[in-house]
Every structure is written in C-alpha cells, then in structure tokens.
Amino acid sequence: MGTSNRYECEKCKQSVQASLKETEGMNTKVKAFKCNDCNEVGDCIIAFKNDLHPEYQNVIPSCEECGGKNVIAWDVKCPKCGNAMNDTGFSMMWD
C-alpha cells in the first residue's frame, strides 16, 4: 500500500500532496516529480505490473496534470515561490 504526505509552503501557503520517496501500491510504483511545463508537483508512475507483466516494468514518468514528459524529481521546493516546503505529515494511503 502506498502513502502520500502533505507539504505546505509557509511563505505562500501552497500545498502539495505527494509521495516524496519511491513508494508502491499493488500494481504501480510512484515518485514525486515537478513538471517543468505546467509547474505542478505530483506523483508520477515510474513502474507498473499486471497479469501480462507480473514483474515491474519501468516507464518514463509523465505529468498527471498536463501529460508532459518534461518532469524532474521534486526537490521539496514550492512550485509557486521556490521556498522550501514543510512536510505536515501523512495525508493518505492508496492502492
């Protein structure tokens, strides 16, 4: 079961929900990325498995918001103002 935390920027009050470290659910592995096209932060699928592929298959991450492939690993900086974001703790569990 994967988990996500909530991150908040003290300066501009922007919030992000993401799995900072690589985490996995039943069929996917995700990691937090920042999209350089739309400036959103979120979890991107980095690997999946299914009945046809019982072992994890790596995929090129893409932005969940705009579909762009211009993503980089998130450095915990606010996508709005660049300030360091604070981890406010556990946000949700996903499968």
Image (cartoon, rainbow, N blue to C red):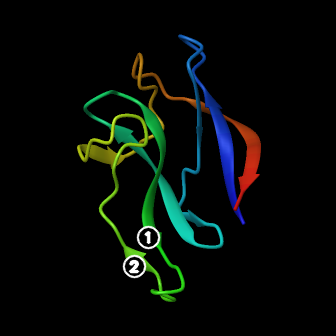
- Residue 53, position as x, y percentages in the image: 45, 86
Q: Which mark is residue 57?
A: 2
- Residue 15, position as x, y percentages in the image: 59, 24
- Position of the N terminus, as image quadrant, is bottom right
Residue matched to label 1: 47
- Nearer-the-camera pick, 11 or 5: 5
Location of residue 39 with respect to 70 vertically, above or below: above
Q: Residue at x 74, y 41 (%)?
A: 91
How packed is label 2: few (under 14 Cα within 10 Å), some, or many (20 or more)? Answer: few
- Position of the C terminus, as image quadrant, is bottom right
Q: Residue at x 51, y 59 (%)?
A: 30
- Nearer-the-camera pick, 14 or 58: 58
Q: Residue furthest front?
A: 52
Q: Residue at x 42, y 18 (%)?
A: 80
Picture quarter containing residue 94?
Answer: bottom right
- Nearer-the-camera pick, 6 or 10: 6
- Residue 27, position as x, y percentages in the image: 58, 72
Location of residue 80 with respect to 48 vertically, above or below: above
Residue 85 appears left or right of 60: right
**Mark 2: amino acid:** Gln
Location of residue 62 with respect to 59 vertically, above or below: above
How packed is label 1: few (under 14 Cα within 10 Å), some, or many (20 or more)? Answer: some
**Mark 1: amino acid:** Ala
- Residue 56, position as x, y percentages in the image: 46, 81
In terms of secondary structure, where does tag 1 sit? strand
Q: Are marks 2 and 1 in contact (CB under 8 Å)?
A: yes
Location of residue 14 with respect to 51 vertically, above or below: above
Q: Residue at x 37, y 43 (%)?
A: 63
- Mark 2 / mark 1, whichever is N-terminal: 1
Q: CA distance from mark 2 to mark 1?
A: 5 Å
